[in-house]
Amino acid sequence: MRHAVLVLPLVLFACDPDPEPAAAPPETYVPMSDAQLEAALTEAKARAGASERRILLDFGADWCPDCREVLRLAHESPVKELLAERYETLVIDVGRFDQHEELLQRFHIDRIATLVVLDAEGERVAQTTLEPISGAAEGLTADDLAGWLRTPRDHWQP
């Protein structure tokens, strides 16, 4: 009888038709110093090399609706699973293009939301700018984004 009393709450919890919602995605565009970003990139390279993954740099800002939409899609299936399986992801807050200027220049970034794929050594593989709300990528879906992440190529538009 004691075991039944202990197991019953677990059974009832497992049958709950209204499970707790998933936690909201963390704040995404968190400002960081150039030194913090460089350290994060170094760590991402090490993890990517150890796990045979690539690195995804997501350049954006909170004020940019396209950037917010790309980040929203990154938390949807199948993108979320693909990122977890194949990428080390760094979300880079560019402010008003006044943050991380060296990286912006290195990758010739003059628009956001820009995604840059690097190999584990930090060499550029592909790059694209997505404008799912204001531009050519209007109507971008999670499946579209996942397709690009599977086979990244330069200047892609869905």
Image (cartoon, helix red, strand yellow):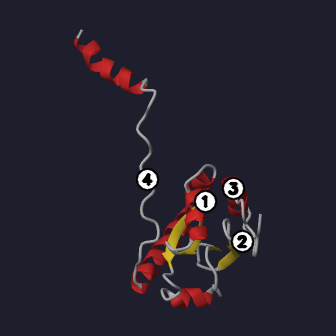
Residue at the farthest top position: 1
Mark earlier in primary sequence (3, 2): 2
Compare residues 118 and 116 and report the one nearer the observer. Answer: 116
Q: Which mark is residue 24?
A: 4
Query: Residue 27 at what x, y percent from top left?
Result: 42, 64
Q: Which quadrant does the C terminus fall into?
A: bottom right
Query: Residue 66 at what x, y percent from top left?
Result: 61, 69
* Residue at 44% across, 75% down: 40
Q: Mark 1 and 2 residues: CB-CB less than 8 Å, in contact?
A: no
Q: CA distance from mark 1 to mark 4?
A: 22 Å
Closer to the camera: disc 1 or disc 2? 2
* Residue at 43% across, 85% down: 34
Tell me the crowding category of disc 4: few under 14, some 14 to 19, or many 20 or more residues within 10 angstroms, Cα based.
few
Q: Which residue is mark 1?
A: 86
* Residue at 58% across, 51% down: 76
Query: Residue 45 at what x, y percent from top left?
Result: 52, 73
